[in-house]
Image (tube, rainbow, N blue to C red):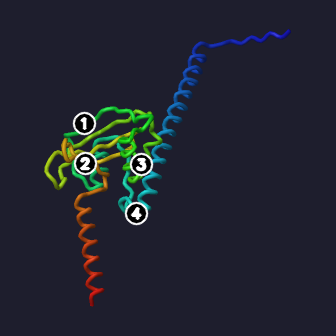
Amino acid sequence: MFIFTAKVNRKKILLGAAAVVALVLTAGVGVRLAGDVAAISIWDTDTEAAAGSGEQAEETVSTLALTNEERIAYLQACGWEVDANSCVMQEVIIPSDFDETYQSYAELQARQGFDLEKLKGKRVKQITYTVTNYPEEGEVIAELLVYRGNIVAGDICSMKTDGGFTRGLMDHPERDQTQTDETADSTNTAKGEDSK
């Protein structure tokens, strides 16, 4: 039989225990940050892929939305001016099962490069601002959904009870009219060339 004896200093035991706790906490924070960075990378990759497809703006815009300034900058990059003081924030849960209305909303988001399917059942922040540069009369708001500090969905919608609308963040009425005018011009030019 062997007997081991050791002289133990209480101070060294406490310092050792504190070091172990600090190491565990640091590792936990590191894992949490890694998860957030991975989530941001996923959304940035999705945004870049959509931007590369020509359906989005020509330059990639950061979807980071931790501060009011970052969210307003994102909306400005999409072409919208908003009242910073009109910010309203609340938590909502993305439904686990999409009904017909929410499925249409998810399809609108997919056209913008966002994937709400990945967020079914997740709690997100819904942040709204009053849009100040919408060309028509009436109250129009910009709505952003934010998950882990990143924009995961957004839209521009009218608060009218009759004749209201919901459109994508990049769907500007002026652009729609410009495209309609350009199409009409090219059609008229082609008709004029055919008649010569």
Q: Earlier in the sequence, mark 2 or mark 1?
A: 1
Q: CA distance from mark 3 to mark 2?
A: 20 Å
* Tag 1 residue: 88
Q: Amino acid at mark 2?
A: Phe
Residue 152: x and y in percent read: 39, 44
Question: Counting other residues with Cα less than 10 Å from the Cα at mark 2, is it few (<14), some (14-19), or many (20 or more)?
Answer: few
Q: CA distance from mark 2 to mark 4?
A: 24 Å
Q: Amino acid at mark 3?
A: Phe
Q: CA distance from mark 2 to mark 1?
A: 20 Å
Q: Between label 1 and label 4, give the one nearer the viewer.
A: 4
Asked which quadrant contains residue 78, the reply is: bottom left
Q: Amino acid at mark 4?
A: Gly
Q: Residue at x 29, y 43 (%)?
A: 143
Residue 55: x and y in percent read: 38, 60
* Tag 3 residue: 114
Q: Between label 2 and label 1, give the one nearer the viewer.
A: 2
Could you tell me which secondary element the residue under label 1 belongs to?
A: strand
Q: Say if 150 sits above or below 184 in the image.
A: above
Q: Earlier in the sequence, mark 3 or mark 4?
A: 4
> Would you say the residues marked 2 and 1 are in contact, meaning their CB atoms lie under 8 Å apart?
no
Q: Say if 183 sits above or below 12 in the image.
A: below
Question: Counting other residues with Cα less than 10 Å from the Cα at mark 3, is it few (<14), some (14-19), or many (20 or more)?
Answer: many
Q: CA distance from mark 1 to mark 4?
A: 32 Å
